[in-house]
Image (spheres, coloured by chain):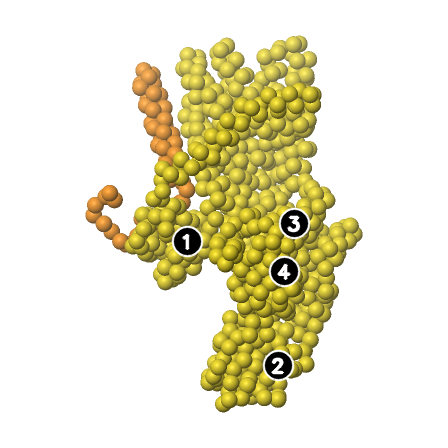
Chain colours: A orange, B yellow
Amino acid sequence: MEILTILIPVSLLLGGAGLAAFFWALKTKQYDDPQGDAARILKTDYDDRPKS
Amino acid sequence: MSLVEEYDAGHVSPSACPACAVAPSAERLAQMSQPSHARLMLSLPTAHCAACMSTVENGLQALPGVQSARVNLTLRRVSVDAAPDVTAASLIPVLAGLGYEAHELDPGLLSATETDKQGRDLLMRLGVAGFAMMNVMLLSVAVWSGAGDATRDLFHWISAAIALPTVVFAGQPFFKSAWASLRAGRLGMDVPISLALVLASSISLFETFNSGHHAYFDAAVMLTFFLLGGRYLDHRTRAVARSAAEELAALEVPRATRLLDRVEEEVAISALAIGDIVRVRPGGRMPVDGVVTHGTSEVDRSLLTGESLPSMAAPGMAIAAGEINLTGPLLVRVTAAGRDSSLHRMADLVAVAESAKTKHTSLADRAARAYSPLVHILSFAAFGFWMWRTGGDLRYAVNISAAVLIITCPCALGLAVPAVVTAASGRLFRKGLLIKDGTALERLAEVDHVVFDKTGTLTLGTPKPVNLDALPPSVLGVALGLAGASSHPLAMALSKASDIAPAVLSDVQEVPGYGIEGRLDGKLVRLGRAEWVGATPAAQTATYLALGSETHAILFADKLRPGAEVAVAAMKAAGLKLTLLSGDAPAPVVDLAARIGIEDWQAGQLPTEKADFVKALQDAGHKVLMIGDGLNDTAALAQAHVSISPATALDAARTASDIVLLGQDMAPVADALRIAKQSTRRIRENFMLSGGYNVIAVPLALMGLATPLLAALAMSLSSITVSLNALRLR
C-alpha cells in the first residue's frame, strides 16, 4: 500500500497540470474563435519561420 | 431613511468630483499615448472557410497603413489594427474586390461581446469542478470497492481537501443566486441546490472527523459540475443571441451629414440640434424629423407606415426619421432630434406595450416552484421521522435528511431545460433564426393565431414589373433606356427585369421627385409619376411612360419573400389561424392575400390599430404570433405573445421581437414552430425522466438505505439521460 504515497500525489499533480493548462488556454483567449482555429490549421499558405 | 440617503449623497459628491475631473484628462492621455493606432471592426457575413480567412487577412495586410488583420470565423468578423487615416469605408471596397461582402460595425456597441467575462468565469469554475470531480471520484471508487479503516479515512481526508475548496469556489453562482432569491422572499431552484451543497459538504466533513463510513464529497462536486454545465449552456445560448443582436444594432452607425456654413461634416445623430441643416443623399435613411428646405425627391416610408408606394418630398414638406430618400439629394431642417423624434415616440409606445404584457412563467420556473417546497418538506420530514424513530440520534437523522436532499437535488432538472434550449436554438440558428429570449421557444409552441405584416415581411419591399409582356418591344426599349439612368428602386427593377436592348436616347436627365426624361429622335419622352407624364394614376404601384401624346402604365407588384408561401402553407396545415394586417392601400393587400392564400386581411391599418387587434385576440384567449418589420408593427410585436422580425427590420422592431429571421428566406419560420413544439415536449419528457429517477431513489433514501454510490449513480444517470434526450431534437 506504500505505493499510494507516490500514486496519489502523482495523480493530483497530473490533474493539476491539466487544470493549469486549461486556465492558461482560457486566459490567452483560445476559446474565443473555435471555428476559426479549426479552419486555420487547414490553411495552405505555409511558411517555414515563426511570425516575428 | 431618506434623510440618511440625502446625507450620504451630499457626503459622497465632493469626493466623487475630483474623479470626474480627472477622467476626461486620463482619456485624453490615453488617446495621446497611442496616436498611430486605430481598431476597426467589420462584419463579414459570407466568410466561412480557411481560404476565406487567408484571403481576407492577406488582402488587408497588403494595404498601406494596415498593421494587422485577424478574422474571427465564429463571429464572422474581422478586426483591423491600422493607422488612424485608414477608415472602414476605405476597406469595404477592397474586401468587395476580394469577393466578400463587408459592413462597418460600431466598436462602441460591440465592447460587451468582445470579452465575454461572465462566460469565461463560468468556464473556469466548470474546469475546476471537473478536475475535482475526476479526482474525488477516483478516491471514492476505492472506498466503495471496500477500502477499510485507515485507508478509507485517508481517502476521505484527501477528498475533503479537494472538494471543500472546489465547492466554495465553483458553487458561488448558486450561493449568490440562492441568497438573492431568499432575500426577495422566493424559493428558487438554487435554494435547494445550495442547501444540498452546504449540507453534503459539512455532513461529510463531520463523518470524516469521526471516521464514518459514508462521505458525500463526490456527490457535492458532481452536483456542482453538472449544474455548472447547465448554467454554462444557458449562458452561451444567451451570449450568442446577444452578440448577434448587438451586431445587428452595430451595423447602423448612427451618423448624419450636417451642413454648417456651407461646410459638410459627419456628426453623430445625438449631436444634432433643432434648426440644424442636414444633407440626406439618395439611398440614405432620414436621421431626424424635419422639413425639406432644398431639393425634390421621393421617399419610401414603408418601414413607418407599410405603404408600398413612394411619396413625394419637396421644399416645405415634413419628413420623419426612418424614411428612405430615393432619388435626389435633400437638405432638411431638423425639427425634432433624438428623444423627441417620431422614432423615439414609437419606442415609448413599445415600452408601454411591453410593461402591459403579462410576464410569462417559463416551464423551468413552474417546475422549480412546485419542486423546491416539496424537496424541503421531504428532507425535514425524514429528519423528524428518524429523530423520533431512533430516539434522538441527531447524527443519523441529519445524515438521512442530507441524503434525501442530495438525491432529490435538481441536477437533471438544472440540465433539463438548458440542454433542450441550447440544442433547439443551435439548430434554428443554423437555419437562420436567432432566438433572443430563452422562453421564446416555449411561447412559440403555444401559438394558435399568426398575424402578418405585408410590406417588408411577406414581401421583400422590392418591386417587380408585372405587365411587361403587354407592352410592344419598341415602347419597352424606350422605358429601359430611361430607367437605366436612374437609381430609383422602380427604375432599377425595370432595368433588371428585361433583356431587350434599351433604345438609344439623347439628353437623358433625372428630375428628382418626378422621374427621368430624354429625347428619342428629337421627341421628348418621360418615365415617372403619373401627373408629371400626364397619365391617369392606377390603383397599384406603377410608373408611367409618355411617348409624345400616348402614355403607358408599367405596373409593379411587390416581390414575395422567398419561402413565404411555404411558411404560410405549413402554418395552415398546422391548423393555425392567419391574418394579414397592412398599412398599405387595399388593392395591393387583396392581391397579395389572394396570391399567398390568406383569407383574413385588413388594409390601411394604423400602428395603434394593429396593436389593438393583437390585444383583442389575446383578451379572447388566443396566443398570437406577430411577424412584422416596420415601425408601425413595433407596438403589435411587443404586445403579441411571441414575435418574429426579419433582420432588415428597423432597430426598434428587432428589439421588440423575440426571434429575428437572419436570412431572406421565410421557410425557417415553419421549422421554428415545429421545433418549438418538439422542444417543449422534450423539456416535459426531461422533467418526467428526472422525476422518475427520484421516484425510485427517494424512498430508498427515506428508508435510510441510500449510499453515496447510489446517489452518484442516480445523479449521473439522470443527467446523462436528459442530455441525450435533448440531443434527439431534429
**Location of mark 2 (residue):** B533
Position of B120 relative to B170 (above/below): below
Label 2 CA crowd tier, 10 Å (few <14, some 14–19, many 20+): many
Badge 3 and badge 1 in a common chain: yes
Nearer to us: label 3 or label 1 = 3
Q: What is the CA distance from the residue labelled 1 to the residue labelled 4?
A: 31 Å
Residue B91: quadrant of the picture: bottom left
Say which amino acid is labelled 4. Answer: Val
Which residue lies at the image location 70% right of the left edge and 47% below the top edge?
Answer: B353
Q: Residue furthest right?
A: B620
Percent from the top left, x then y, of residue B304? Answer: 64, 59
Q: Residue tagged by mark 4?
A: B291
- Please, what secondary structure does the residue beneath circle 2 have? helix
- Residue A51 vs B174, above or below: the answer is below
- Circle 1 crowding by C-alpha within 10 Å: few under 14, some 14–19, many from 20: some
**Residue, disc 1:** B88
Q: For marks 3 and 2, give the CA distance.
A: 39 Å
> Do the CB atoms of the residues marked 4 and 2 lie less than 8 Å apart?
no
Q: From the image, tell me which residue sits under label 3.
A: B340
The 10 Å Cα crowd at callout 3, few under 14, some 14 to 19, many 20 or more, is few
Quadrant where the N terminus of chain B lies? top right
